[in-house]
Amino acid sequence: MAAVAAASPALTLAVAAAVITAACLLLCAEAVWLDLPQSGTKCVSEEIQSNVVVLADYALMYESHPSSHPTIAVKVTSPYGNTLHHNENATVGQFAFTTSEAGNYLACFWIDSAEKGSGISINLDWKIGIAAKDWDDIAKKEKIEGVELELRKLEVAVQSIHQNMIYLKAREAEMRTVSEKTNARVAWFSILSLSVCIVVSILQLWHLQGYFQKKKLI
């Protein structure tokens, strides 16, 4: 009993450390550097659940093109193909929306100007969920700062982790249901195929028996 009691605080600290680490990861934004080819489209996708705030900023990197100013086109679509953001002849831009359905959200970029050069680079700062919140504005409205603000961030991060776990559990149940239905269909198809083979074999035997009897071979 003493060994169990001694291990409990260590286990509690380990769980707390895991939660804090996951929360810090959720608070980070995802910055992506994309190299666009002269022709064609380059896309970035993210699987997001419903009712999640998405905020992204994109900008051309002019260091590789000091003498020319190419432009790009941007299109963001939902899992069902609905256009959430479309911009042409752009050098910088931003899109923001709240997801209405769960699935893969796609952001595609391509060069739409005559000055293509050898391709261009863009910087995409993609923020999802709690990372898209304006914490400075929240701190001013709720009059919190320092440790209290960091604890508030961790609280929201833990809530986000909990919601994500519920979402993953629902997806797992959905996939399990689909798998069970597929297995049931395969089983019924196997039984039907076996039944057809048995019926065909019986008919062949009956036909051969009649043929041999007609020829008086049996």
Image: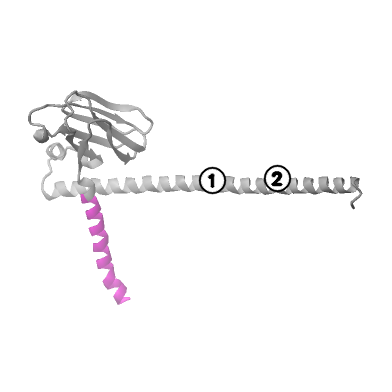
**Residue 105 at x, y percent in the picture:** 32, 35
User: Splitting the image into 4 quarters, where does residue 174 fall?
Assistant: top left
Taking depth in this image into account, of 168 and 80 the one nearest to the observer is: 80
Secondary element under disc 2, as helix, strand or loop, is helix
Which residue reaches farthest bottom?
Answer: 2
Which residue reaches farthest left?
Answer: 66
Please give the name of the residue rendered at 66% of the width and 45% of the height, measured from the top-left corner: 192
Magenta span: predominant SS is helix
Please give the name of the residue rendered at 80% of the width and 49% of the height, measured from the top-left corner: 205
Q: Report the residue marked by disc 1.
A: 182
Dot 1 and dot 2 residues touching (CB under 8 Å): no
**Residue 146 at x, y percent in the picture:** 10, 48
The disc label shown at residue 133, or none: none
Q: Is residue 196 left or right of residue 155?
A: right
Please give the name of the residue rendered at 28% of the width and 32% of the height, measured from the top-left corner: 41
Q: Quadrant of the N terminus?
A: bottom left
Secondary element under disc 1, as helix, strand or loop, is helix
Taking depth in this image into account, of 158 and 203 the one nearest to the observer is: 203
Q: Report the residue marked by disc 2.
A: 196
Quick check: can you spot residue 132? no
Residue extent of the magenta highlight = 1-24
The kind of residue on which mark 2 rests is Val
Give the class, few, some or many, for how many residues have Cα within 10 Å of label 1's Cα (few <14, many ≥20). Answer: few
User: Splitting the image into 4 quarters, where does residue 5 fall?
Assistant: bottom left
Please give the name of the residue rendered at 7% of the width and 31% of the height, measured from the top-left corner: 66
- Of marks 1 and 2, which one's residue comes earlier in the chain? 1
**Disc 1 and disc 2: Cα gap in Å?**
21 Å
Give the class, few, some or many, for how many residues have Cα within 10 Å of label 2's Cα (few <14, many ≥20). Answer: few
Quick check: can you spot residue 77? yes
Q: Is residue 72 left or right of residue 69?
A: right
